Amino acid sequence: IGLASIDIFAKANVFSSDRRMRLQQEGALILFHAGSNVATAIGNEVINGGASVIRINGNQVNVRVDSNANAVRDAADRWIAYRWDGNGPNSFQVRYCAQCGNANCNFNQCVAPVEVLGTRVSAFQVTSLLNASNAVRFDVTECWDPDGAPNACGTPHNPSLSMTNTVF
């Protein structure tokens, strides 16, 4: 009985640790991807007008990036977007559009193929800090089974993880 108890205990802890590790890898990928792309944003919202560099619309953020890396806002620059869907066919996914057709970036009109960066995201929030510190904050919460059925997020069988990244 003692060996069976140790075996069950070990399997349960390894199982939960493995899930937490996978959530951490996916969350880190999302934050690194968004951070490295948003860091190449080009423009000045004071000079070019509000929402001319970063547009946050609910669960989506659109960013004008310096695609030719010349540090000048020009016609070669493009809009990119990140979007989280909490329901529907793309539930709990963070998707990335590498080249939007325009500043509004409807994902159905994405010029480049849409990439799925994460599939276990239970919350994704982007906050503009442009007025305070010229930055954008990304908050990602991941859950092994994001719909919370049958085990709620944050339980040993359904671990969750929250991560934050601020991009200047």
Image (cartoon, grey):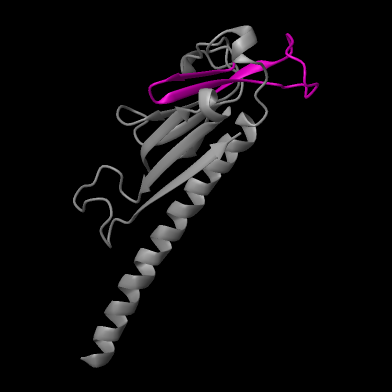
Residue 85 at what x, y percent from top left?
A: 37, 29
Residue 67 at what x, y percent from top left?
A: 72, 22
Residue beneath the point at 47% across and 44% down: 164
| Residue extent of the magenta highlight | 53-81
Q: Nearer the viewer, residue 72 or 123?
A: 72
Would you say residue 156 is visible in this rendering? yes
Which quadrant of the structure image shows residue 91? top left
Residue 34 at what x, y percent from top left?
A: 56, 35
Q: Is residue 89 left or right of residue 108?
A: left
Q: Nearer the viewer, residue 116 or 54?
A: 54
Q: Is residue 90 left or right of residue 100?
A: left
Q: Nearer the viewer, residue 2 or 28?
A: 28
When the figure is inspected, residue 45 is found, relative to residue 41, above or below; the finding is: above
Quarter holding the C terminus is top right
- Asked if residue 94 lies in the magenta stretch, the reply is no
Q: Residue furthest bottom?
A: 2
Q: Is residue 9 left or right of residue 107?
A: left
Quarter holding the N terminus is bottom left
Would you say residue 119 is visible in this rendering? no
Q: Residue furthest front?
A: 132
Q: Residue furthest right?
A: 70
Residue beneath the point at 24% across and 84% down: 5
Residue beneath the point at 60% across and 21% down: 112
Which quadrant of the structure image shows residue 79? top right
